[in-house]
Amino acid sequence: MSNNLEFEKPIIELENKIGELEKFSKENQVDLSNEIKILKNKLNNMKNEIYENITPWQKVKIARHKERPTTLEYIEKIFTDFIEFHGDRNYGDDNAIVGGIAILEDTPVTVIGHQKGKDTKDNIKRNFGMPHPEGYRKALRLMKQAEKFNRPVIMFVDTPGAYCGLEAEQRGQGEAIATNLLKMSGLKTPILVVVIGEGGSGGALGLSIGDRICMLEHSIYSVISPEGLSSILWKDASLAEKAADIMKLTSKDLLDLKVIDKIIKEPPGGTHKDLDLVSENIKKYLNDEISKLLKLEKKELLNNRYKKVREIGIYK
Amino acid sequence: MSNNLEFEKPIIELENKIGELEKFSKENQVDLSNEIKILKNKLNNMKNEIYENITPWQKVKIARHKERPTTLEYIEKIFTDFIEFHGDRNYGDDNAIVGGIAILEDTPVTVIGHQKGKDTKDNIKRNFGMPHPEGYRKALRLMKQAEKFNRPVIMFVDTPGAYCGLEAEQRGQGEAIATNLLKMSGLKTPILVVVIGEGGSGGALGLSIGDRICMLEHSIYSVISPEGLSSILWKDASLAEKAADIMKLTSKDLLDLKVIDKIIKEPPGGTHKDLDLVSENIKKYLNDEISKLLKLEKKELLNNRYKKVREIGIYK
Amino acid sequence: MLKALFRKKKYATVSVDNDNNYSNNIKKNENKIQDDIDNKLWTKCKNCGEILLKEDIKEDLYTCGKCNYYFRIPARERINMIFDKDTFTEYDKDLKASNPLEFPEYDKKLKKATDKSKEVEAIVTGEGDIKGIKTVLCVMEANFMMGSMGSVVGEKITRAIEKAIEKKLPVIIFCASGGARMQEGILSLMQMGKTSAALNRLSDEKLPFISVLTDPTTGGVTASFAMLGDIILAEPKALIGFAGPRVIEQTIRQTLPEGFQRSEFLKEKGFVDKIVKRKFLKEKLYKILYIHTMGSERYE
Amino acid sequence: MLKALFRKKKYATVSVDNDNNYSNNIKKNENKIQDDIDNKLWTKCKNCGEILLKEDIKEDLYTCGKCNYYFRIPARERINMIFDKDTFTEYDKDLKASNPLEFPEYDKKLKKATDKSKEVEAIVTGEGDIKGIKTVLCVMEANFMMGSMGSVVGEKITRAIEKAIEKKLPVIIFCASGGARMQEGILSLMQMGKTSAALNRLSDEKLPFISVLTDPTTGGVTASFAMLGDIILAEPKALIGFAGPRVIEQTIRQTLPEGFQRSEFLKEKGFVDKIVKRKFLKEKLYKILYIHTMGSERYE
Ligand SMILES: [Zn+2]
Ligand SMILES: [Zn+2]
């Protein structure tokens, strides 16, 4: 139960009730088909009502849901022959970012992504998906490798943010992210970005400059966490829900602001309810777009990428 | 006195004696001109005898002499407008390697070199000229900067070796040196290397791939220190003198083995006796060679550099 | 003259600064002056508490005459210090922030920032000469919403870089920023990518970019153009970091060591090429540009 | 058969190994066998002390059947393990060391090394197929003067890389070396530059280089080609370092922590892409090559 989201509770409760009735009807051979039909109708309406009107704050909850699939799960579903490569050849191997080579249908690719843990132990290893500088530098090393061997790069974005600690500062968190932004904007091979969960600020952006950027429907992407914003605005992190409402962090908002190109639909309630389906949709999207991108001259590819990031911003 | 070299002692003693006689002759108005003349003659012969027959081990001593000028001293004499740049943009700033930009006559250049200390305090700061990986990475960063802005690179080599410590291993001493070797072999701007003191093994080589490599007459360059070799061969580091004799580490040996292109003469006893003269000679050499190198197409430059390193080795 | 009259005297009971952290240290003094006059003429050094005539500070390159503390410099004053007299041509001076997210109170904040800083945004860009070397210069204005970067700052920097590419000029950016401007949300974040991409193009053209870090350089600015200089200079003791000190302390639950995230620390950690005192900055920038422009003539 | 007869029995009082560190641990046993027979047929695991039939070890890919310890593999055995049957063509097999420095006893040492390893130098190079993918392969021979690199090793590797460039093939190097060969002095050191320069050319041609680190990879080999792989694989628990452990201990005057300079440590520190068990090496190399050769077909 603790894994369920607050706003889904009425649905779960009703589903349980229907289940009980069905069981009772069967065991006691009582005909409750009419009642059950009515309730199922009600359930459907409720689902429509709830899932079609998910608030930004509810999306934040879905994006952070502990059952929400992580990068390695998508990699397993979407690619074949994934071989993980470790380390930045410099300081360390950061488990909050994973990467390696794999095959997408018939295309060799480099796959990189933030990696959250699936349980407490795993989360400690993964630092809850919050990378240190060596994570960004590993990613860059693998991107340059991809460039050298002409492999498109697929990025999965899912982080609360780059880690804000003493050592991260000391080893140049800012420099590492900045360098990725610059190098990614000039990387001579296609880059496709999929935001699968939390797109947390600079920590997300450091893996997100690309030719195509899509978001899963219930993922989020923002300059600061709702908690962070509310504590700055109102000195009260508990007003995060209110902050989420104003900050425009949903996939729909980002599409409207022309920051992303595409929203990939999720099943009602979120991807964790049907990973296969969502993986299939991502795969199809990647395949379609890669084949378009591979047709471009490098120069055109880079010009388009530049234009894409160049045009973002609203002023008068 | 402690700064003088053992084998120079007879010279110093005789010089002192002549001085005393001259003083005595003057103060007591005694004519000793004949005796003094004979002694001066003897001194000249002695100097010729000693300085023309400096043994390899004596060269090791000169190369390590605490008054031997260091990289920053040559930079001051040879270049104008030197601006030192720090850091590898990655982990730290290693004081055992210095680098920056400067002007050589009318040519903007990048200058890099190992830096030993001039006294105990300075030596601790400089780690006795033994770099950590971040030193090699700083050097590479500055070389790439030089390549970008088409500046020739001048290298001064003077190190007992790359530091052999826990942290140096941990941060990839091997990787750092290896990467420099590879990148320097392909750097699209001239590289000129001057071995000014100790050319200690991989730690020296990590700054020594270039289009021209010259050595000051009494500097040394070897795969291992004489102490290291003697302790491996005879389990006795005190037999270093014997090791020095067989290991072919003098500038003359290296010229014969075609590892270097040129020997720059030193005044009798070593460069510390006339830094201006040696600096002037280095400057002339650099100027002459740079103007030749700048005339080459990049491709020719790199082909020549490759051939140069490619041809080293003797086998049957 | 008023200046000569008040010099060296302390009028310390009066609140001359909004910052209350330091007011406790100030000794009482009999001579009291009206607040309004005070605030116009005087200010207090945040480091040593010395009361200083604003006019003096300005003459001293915005440093405290007593302890050498660096006050933040208004963008236009910085430009005056760096460029040769009357050589500055401003770019895009009318570009103004809109409120794309309809963020509450943003318009009001912008208005207030303009009143305070006399600038329409947190950056001034343009071209001019440094001892005769033509250069594109961007200077952030810390007095405008803490120098935060929104669409306008990103756009003005990007345009300035593009202009430098077009004219084959070097670029210098003086950084002073609290980071991305949260009132423009994701659009602010994206300015990091935009400016970095423009710098990549500048780099492809082999035109030098010098980043000068001044107090404070943090957040999204540190994680983009601030750290991308071919050469990175810093003023002494400037706060430079990705995360702000308070955020880090909250995360790690301990106080930060003395000097952490200051210029000197950054240099030791390998991220700053050189720390340059304010009074030598113009000369040092000139020398670096001189060496770099020699190079470009030589090999083209 | 002798093999079946002796299997599982321990003949432990006999000195079956030159390494005396482990002989103290061995329990006495009544059954004694002649030393000369022993040394031919049996050896002792350096890790767990188990006495093993050499024939068994070889069948088990040179691992201890009891504790999984990795014995060093003779170069030609390694080639047999990696290349498809009968596909290997050797390069430069007659290149021999001379004694350019007239180093005392070097000729004698070379002779002894050849007797011990049955190789003329510390490396075997050539081309062959890995599950059908043609590849240039260099394998160092630790039994030849500790796999030390002199002129011949440097030259053979360089020629192999140049051959790969000519034929547009990937390169794999199995490293196993104590470092530069001091008997060839400065010429040995220069082989580091030579091989690295050749790899730079390979890299310019976008041909993949996979470095495989096996026990031990130290000194000049670590500071050159070993660390330059596009992809760096390592066998478990291999000693990998620039300076040898003893040199470091002498320098820092303390004992090294458990696991320091082992493959797992190097991976944690970011210098090894992947640790691959010996039995999976061929398959893993094949997959990496497969993905890389797909790429090259696709875009050419
Ligand atoms: Zn002060
Ligand atoms: Zn065993």
Image (tube, coloured by chain):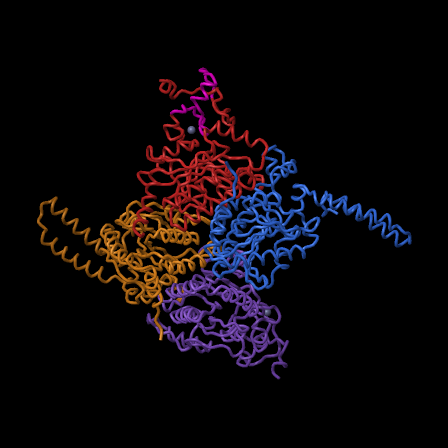
Chain colours: A blue, B orange, C red, D purple
Q: Is residue D299 visible?
A: yes
Numbered marks: total: 0
Q: Residue D80: x and y, percent? A: 53, 76
Q: Nearer the viewer, residue B298 or C169?
A: C169
| Residue A246 or residue D55, whichever sits in front | A246
Q: Name the side, left or right, on which A200 lies relative to D228.
A: right
Q: As drawn, is D125 to the left or to the right of D14? A: left
In front here: A239 or A247? A247
**Residue name at image x 57 percent, y 60 percent:** A84
- Quadrant position of the N terminus of chain C in the picture: top left
Q: Kindly identify the residue that appears in the image at 58 percent across and 61 percent down.
A: A104
Residue projecting furthest to the bottom: D1
Is residue A192 located in the magenta-colored stretch of the structure? Answer: no
Residue at the spot 86% in from the left edge and 47% down from the top edge? A35
> In which quadrant of this rendering is ligand 1 seen?
top left
Residue C276 sits in quarter? top left
Is residue D254 visible in the rendered image? The answer is no
User: Where B165 sits versus D287, above or below?
Assistant: above
Seen from this angle, which residue lies furthest right? Answer: A29
Side of C16 relative to B316 (left or right): right
> Magenta span covers which residues?
C27-55
Relative image position of residue A254 (x, y in whole percent)? 59, 44
Q: How far across and how far down the image is residue D103, in percent?
A: 34, 71
Does C54 lie within the magenta span? yes
Residue B314: x and y, percent?
A: 34, 71
